[in-house]
Image (cartoon, rainbow, N blue to C red):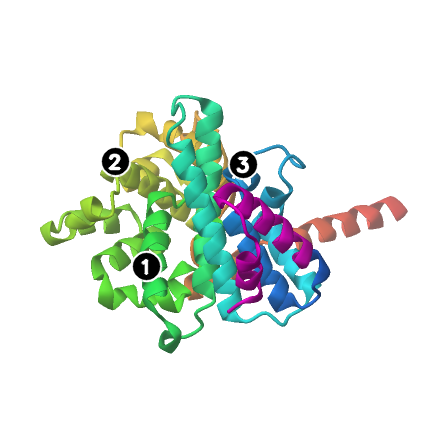
Amino acid sequence: KSLADEVGRAAGGDDAKRKEKQSAMVAALFNLRNDAGEKVELLAKIIDLADVSAVSPGQPKGVAVLADLLESNVLKSTMKLWGETTTNTELRSLYKSVTKAMERVLAKLSKDDQEDKTIALKIKKTEERKQTYMLHFLETYTDESSLDSDANTYAQEAATGAIRDPINLFSTQRGILGLPAISALQKSQPDLYDLLKIFVSGKLQDYRDFTNMPDKMAVFSAYNLSEDDCTKNMSLLSLVSLAGEHEEIPYSEIASTLSVEEDDVEKWVIAAVASGLMEAKMDQLSKVVIVERCAVRQFGTKEWSALKIRLEKYKTNVKGVLDALEKSSALTEG
């Protein structure tokens, strides 16, 4: 039995008092221990025992210390201070506890007024934190031989989450196809995997080809995915891919790529900019979108070649400026 479980059994009394005693004892023990593995184990127990309000994201900093600690970057930085002696099994236990805690928060929030913007924001942040920790959980499976039933369950849910919202956690989810547990879905859930692959690296036409196959359509109802939302997100991702290939994009090309009228192009560009995936300006007279920055959906040989061309162009431009300055300086001195 684990140290945390032994502490739990040591606390007597009725359920409410027992839980309160457990929390206090585990927290005290957590502060006394120095071993990284034990601290991870005890933290998982603290999360399991915590009230929903203590772990709910979206609160002002300092209001809920445990919720602040569970910010992914904060927790990972804190664990580094404890040392590098944690095992994948210990990490799985911790990440599963955080995931379950987020499910408790979502269950409570689902009973609140869904029209309240504050509640909607908390739901969004909680779903994002849950998705992040499911991915952390899957990262602990380093090869196919280590996969178990939990890996398969979490892989299906994480894949569904990445399809349902590929925008807000874009950077976090970009490497999802490289996880062994996700790769295993090619055999166990091939339709789900194929759809996920399109959302990671495909374009709108790939998505439409997928939805035009009758045997693939069942995946939407099976995983409670909205076709309308998926189409909208896939359109935004396709626009981002297009922006990654060109510095200037004619309205006509965007309209063709997204299968929309030219009059609707600006609406899609504004949506893509608002998502944070790209920065661009629109020349309405020339009907051209000037790309200033965009997220990279994948980075392979094609992307390296494009980067090389841009760097060579930048090198040429800089050389031109330096040559002009040198000539100007020579004329001034003469």
**Cβ–Cβ below 8 Å for labels 3 and 1?**
no
The picture places residue 169, in percent across and down from the top left corner, at: 46, 46
Q: Nearer the viewer, mark 3 or mark 1?
A: 3
CA distance separating discs 3 and 1 = 27 Å
Circle 1 residues within 10 Å: few <14, some 14–19, many ≥20:
few
- Which is nearer the N-term, disc 2 or disc 3? 3
Please tell me the numbered disc located at residue 153: 1
Q: Please provide the residue range marked out in magenta.
A: 1-30
Amino acid tagged 3:
Ser
Q: Position of residue 325 (x, y in %)?
A: 77, 48
Q: Secondary structure at mark 3?
A: helix
Q: Which residue was labeled with disc 3?
A: 53
Disc 1 marks a residue whose amino acid type is Thr
Which mark is first along the chain, 1 or 3?
3
Query: Is there a contact, CB below 8 Å, between mark 2 and mark 1?
Result: no
Residue 162 sits above or below residue 280 on the image: below
The residues tagged by marks 2 and 3 sit, at their Cα atoms, a distance apart of 34 Å
List x then y, in percent, for residue 97. Answer: 48, 54
Residue 165 image-quadrant placement: top left
Name the chief secondary structure element in magenta: helix
Which element type, helix, strand or loop, lies under badge 2? helix
Q: Residue at x 50, y 39 (%)?
A: 52
Note whether residue 248 is visible.
no
In the displayed orientation, state which residue is furthest to the bottom.
Answer: 145
Closer to us: mark 2 or mark 1?
1
Please report the residue visible at 70 percent of the width from the left and 56 percent of the height from the top.
31
What mark, if any, has residue 228 been given in the picture? 2
Q: Is residue 25 magenta?
A: yes
Instruction: Kindly state the secondary structure of the residue where label 1 is placed.
Output: helix
Asked whether, in this view, residue 333 is left or right of residue 228, the answer is right
Quarter of the rendering containing residue 189: bottom left
Neighbor class of circle 2 (other Cα within 10 Å; few <14, some 14-19, many 20+) is few
